Image: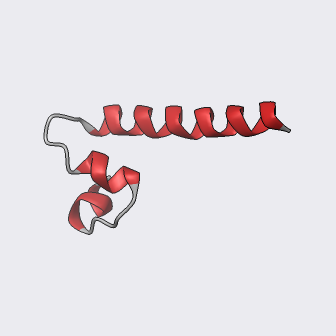
Amino acid sequence: MTAKRAHPDGDVISRLCDEPDLADFEIATLAMQLLFAGHETTVTQI
């Protein structure tokens, strides 16, 4: 998270890191949920 905060890109994780009210743990949790949700959607479509 430190690298993303120092050098943000145009991705979702960088946008989450821009939120001052979110802790690193919360950002990591949200990122894992997004990853799982995308994976679950893809698996059920296949």
Kindly give the residue lying farthest to the left in the view shown.
Answer: 20
Does 3 sit above or below residue 23?
below
Q: Position of residue 13 (x, y in %)?
A: 38, 51
Q: Position of residue 6 (x, y in %)?
A: 22, 65
Kindly give the residue lying farthest to the right in the view shown.
Answer: 46
Residue at the image point whose x is 33% and y is 67% from the top: 9
Q: Position of residue 37 (x, y in %)?
A: 60, 32
Residue at the image point whose x is 31% and y is 63% from the top: 3
The number of callouts visible is: 0
Q: Position of residue 18 (x, y in %)?
A: 20, 51
Q: Is residue 32 left or right of residue 28?
A: right
Considering the image in quadrants, where does the C terminus appear? top right
Does 11 sit above or below residue 41?
below
Q: Is residue 28 left or right of residue 43?
A: left
Residue at the image point whose x is 27% and y is 56% from the top: 2
**Colour scheme of the rendered structure:** secondary structure
Residue closest to the eye, 26 or 42: 42
Q: Is residue 44 left or right of residue 16?
A: right
Residue closest to the eye, 24 or 45: 45
Does 7 sit above or below residue 33?
below
Residue at the image point whose x is 29% and y is 40% from the top: 24
